[in-house]
Amino acid sequence: MDPLVFISALARDAGVLLCERMDAPRQVEEKHRHDLVTDADRASEALIVERIRAAYPTAAILGEESGAHAGSGDERFIVDPLDGTTNYAHRYPLFCVSIAYERAGVIEAGAVFAPVLGRLYTARRSGGAHCNGAPIRVSATARVHDALVCTGFNPAGYARNARYFGALSDTAQAVRRDGSAALDLAFVADGTFDAFWEWDLKPWDVAAGSLLIEEAGGRTGGVIGGALDIANGSILGSNGVIHAEMEQLLAAA
Ligand code: IPD
Ligand code: CA
Ligand code: CA
């Protein structure tokens, strides 16, 4: 089966599972301070891993909750079964499932499904980005002065981002902190946000969302310049037009 069709259906099914469980009694645990996991995260990942194993038995899987599953070929799925767990635990509706498909070390397809919003964001390398099947494009905002930008705070080190947040709050039209990095990146891809940055994310937070931005005509890279390295996970994603100005502002902070 076409990998994008496969991960799109899978992200949808996992998102439906999350919604079904949202109002039921749930177990919420702290992995570390500010870093939660629920039984729904684990159930979503179990469903996703089982379905990948059945359809792509030789593929490797990197999942947030179950870690690295070795494969024998050059295909790998990178899975965040619930991005925005703290939002989910408080029934704040911005959370999603993020699945990327990688071949020979290159992300070829990504799907981000936000079930409460009913939005399935998809991207195929060299094939464009879509939301619920309609093409999406980054914004045309030309100056940070006019931009709505978003950031996230790594649970292991909130303080690190404080001065960047302060600097951009002064310069941009406004700064948001929505709590789901994969969805924040999708919101850059569809032009809602003009840029997003966060330090020290994980591959499962950025793999699908970065392809969405690139295929929607935007740009991704490191927070203060350089190429994006999904293994490192510090990311600046933007509409491309304000990318250099964002880099400069963040570097100066
Ligand atoms: C978190 C979210 C959040 C970001 C954190 C991530 P999780 O992922 O994407 O927005 O600020 O750095 O860890 O734990 O909800 O999957
Ligand atoms: Ca995440
Ligand atoms: Ca997660």
Image (tube, rainbow, N blue to C red):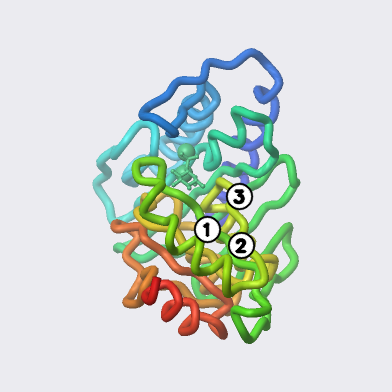
Given residues 148 and 191, the one toward you in this image is: 148
Instruction: Classify residue 214 as left or right of residue 189.
Output: left
- From the image, tell me which residue sits under label 2: 175
For image coordinates 35% across by 60% down, the residue present is: 230
- From the image, tell me which residue sits under label 1: 151
Mark 1, secondary structure of its residue = strand
- Which numbered mark, 2 or 3, is in the foreground of this view? 2
Query: Given the image, on which type of amino acid does mark 1 rest?
Result: Thr
Picture coordinates of residue 171, whole percent (x, y) = 58, 74
Residues at discs 1 and 2 in contact (Cβ within 8 Å): yes
The numbered dot on residue 8 is none
Label 3 crowd bin: few (<14), some (14–19), many (20+), radius 10 Å? some
Query: Given the image, on which type of amino acid does mark 2 rest?
Result: Val
Q: Is residue 128 visible?
A: no
- From the image, tell me which residue sits under label 3: 178
Answer yes or no: disc 3 within 8 Å of ligand 1.
yes
Given residues 156 and 165, the one toward you in this image is: 165
For image coordinates 53% across by 64% down, the residue present is: 196
Of the two numbered discs 3 and 1 on the same chain, state the one appearing first in sequence.
Answer: 1
Mark 3, secondary structure of its residue = loop
Mark count? 3
